[in-house]
Image: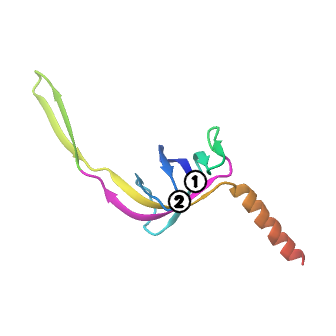
Amino acid sequence: MYAIVDISGKQFRVEPKSTLKVPFQKFEAGNEVSYDKVLLVDDGKNVKIGTPYVSGSLIKATIIEHGRDKKIVVFKKKRRKGYKVKNTHRQEFTRILVDTINLDVAKQNKSSQKEKTTEKED
């Protein structure tokens, strides 16, 4: 089973128990996050393609750590003008561990609400 999910404007292929390096997320390490912008889900038998997102799908992940990538040199030059500028940049990232890929969250929520209401009636 795998899914393609949109995380901070970038698309990633995720599988359960896999780790990913995604753009920086504003949560602390150890927190659980969920992503609902699922573009495609393949469970081995069926492939669901969203328009633009697959409704009712949810990816749950745990934040492992935050870090910074290797340094990138940004060099600008205009010839014959005496203009040279050298800068560097280190992009921040977050490493996450994908816990589960849920296909029908809406159905699960409805069934759990029905169970709660039947328990109250008893």
Q: Is residue 89 above or below residue 15?
A: above
Compare residues 88 and 16 and report the one nearer the observer: 16
Q: Quadrant of residue 77?
A: top left
| Residue 16, label in figure | 2
Residue in the image at 40% along x and 58% along y = 94
Quadrant where the image shows the C terminus:
bottom right
Q: Position of residue 21 (x, y in %)?
A: 40, 54
Compare residues 79 and 108 and report the one nearer the observer: 108
Q: Quadrant of residue 113?
A: bottom right
Asked whether 57 falls inside the magenta stretch, the response is yes
Asked whether 28 falls inside the magenta stretch, the response is no
Residue in the image at 80% along x and 71% along y = 116
Q: Which residue is mark 1?
A: 1
The segment highlighted magenta reads 55-70
Q: How many marks?
A: 2
Please name the amino acid that badge 1 sits on: Met
Q: Position of residue 19 (x, y in %)?
A: 43, 59
In the image, taking residue 65 as reference, residue 102 lies left or right, namely right
Q: Position of residue 70 (x, y in %)?
A: 25, 51
Q: Is residue 108 above or below residue 43?
A: below
Q: Earlier in the sequence, mark 1 or mark 2?
A: 1
Please name the amino acid that badge 2 sits on: Pro
| Residue 36, label in figure | none
Do tag 1 and tag 2 residues touch (Cβ < 8 Å)?
Answer: yes
